[in-house]
Amino acid sequence: MEEIHQPQQVGPNMMPNVGGVPNHSNNVNRRNRVRSSLHSLMIGKRPISEAAQLEMKSLSNKTPVSILQELLSRRGTTPKYELIQVEGAIHEPIFRYRVTVADVVAMGTGKSKKEAKHAAARAVLDKLCRLNSESPDSPLPNSIPDSENLQELSGYGEEKIITNPIGALQEMCMSRHWPPPKYTIENEEGLPHERQFTIVCSVLKYREVGQGKSKKVAKRHAAHKMWQALHYMTTENPNIDEDEVLQRNANVSARYADLKGSKISTLTTIHSLKVSQFHKSLKSSTGVKLFELQNTCLNDGDVNLVQFLQEIASEQQFEVTYVDIEEKSISGKCQCLVQLSTLPVAVCYGCGVTSKDAQASAAQNALEYLKIMTKK
């Protein structure tokens, strides 16, 4: 009887003549290619906010920079990345990137440029996903809160809130070959727990005043105001004060040249001995008023500082002379110097709203000096 050989049936997942081994790879790859094509077609027709959500969910294995690049390339545009700030220590820099997509702006920071760029890309994707929903059902994983990545532009269109104004101002001066900014303490007033500091920031002929409850805050405030002022000036006139910088450098060179040939008197042994004796005698001085000084809080508003200083001067037999300065301070306050006819002569500075306030401020500083020098 003749045998009938029927051909082996090949199922959808079987290949002929390979012992019935399933072939998954070709079908899986084919399905992925179809799915990817459909995905690209869907994204190209969706609003950018929906497309961003779809990209983040389906392409989570890609970096934020790649996702954003692919998302925008289908629309014929690209994101704009800007390195706007480098702060922190030299060995631990912090980079800050800004990325712009149409009218959407976001910020990102990182310990490297790459890390900051990815953070900025994720931040802008996060914002794009929220455009069509005030309360998204599925927030993005590891998304950066807006308060940390977005610096809003306020006031004028180019004004930025600077996280490190002192560093930004220093960088601005260096890039323009200007002398570095100078900071001077203009005033310090108020009770110990409510101190108010005033610091002046100077760059070339420009002055800005900053105030705060600490020296650090006041310095940052002054630097921020100076950065803003110079930023707007240089925007309108990029060649600002070039002649002044050249003249300033020439003056400094001439001044140092004159110093080389000048004779500066130094403290001799005799004068040094007199100063040392004065400090010793002042420290060993006794008196009712000096003892009272050690136990008096000079920030107490009930103390008549000018009268108290005069009483100590009468007791210790030295004279007190006040010299009112006609020119007002940069912050518009009256200024005064008080001189104690000791050996060596002590001169203390004070300022206030009125000339009497300035004298009281100078008297307080003189009392603080005596309090330190006579402390047992």
Image (cartoon, helix red, strand yellow):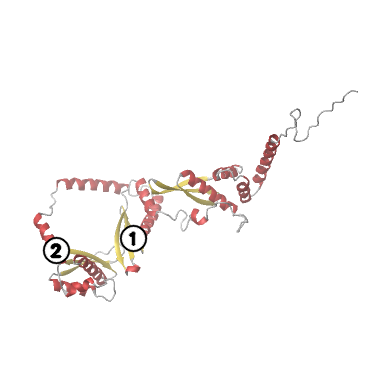
Q: Residue furthest right?
A: 1
Q: Position of residue 182 (x, y in %)?
A: 30, 54
Q: Is residue 341 visible?
A: no
Image quarter in which the C terminus is found: bottom left
Residue 334 relative to residue 113: left or right: left
* Amino acid of disc 2: Lys
Q: Examine the rendering and report whether any part of residue 82 can be seen.
A: yes
Discs 1/2, front: 2
Q: Is residue 221 above or below residue 42?
A: below
Residue 268 in which image quadrant: bottom left
Neighbor class of circle 2 (other Cα within 10 Å; few <14, some 14-19, many 20+) is few
User: Which percent across, then down, holds residue 236?
Assistant: 40, 51
Q: Nearer the viewer, residue 253 or 56?
A: 56
Q: What's the residue type where badge 1 is placed?
A: Lys
The residue positioned farthest toward the left in the image shown: 270
Q: CA distance from mark 1 to mark 2?
A: 33 Å
Query: How many C-alpha atoms fall within 10 Å of the one at disc 1: few (<14), some, or many (≥20)?
Result: some
* 52 or 169: nearer the viewer: 52
Residue sticking out furthest to the front = 1
Q: Is residue 163 left or right of residue 369?
A: right
Residue 7 versus residue 261 in the image, above or below: above
Q: In terms of depth relative to the viewer, which is nearer, 99 or 125?
A: 125
Question: In screen coordinates, is 322 left or right of 31?
Answer: left
Residue 69, by quadrant, is top right
Image spot of residue 21 (x, y percent): 73, 32
Residue under label 1: 215
Q: Mark 2 or mark 1, which is nearer the start of the sequence?
A: 1
The quadrant holding residue 223 is: bottom left
Q: Foreground: 39 or 296? A: 296
The residue tagged with tag 1: helix, strand or loop?
helix
What residue would you read off at disc 2?
A: 280
Point out the image quarter for the N terminus: top right
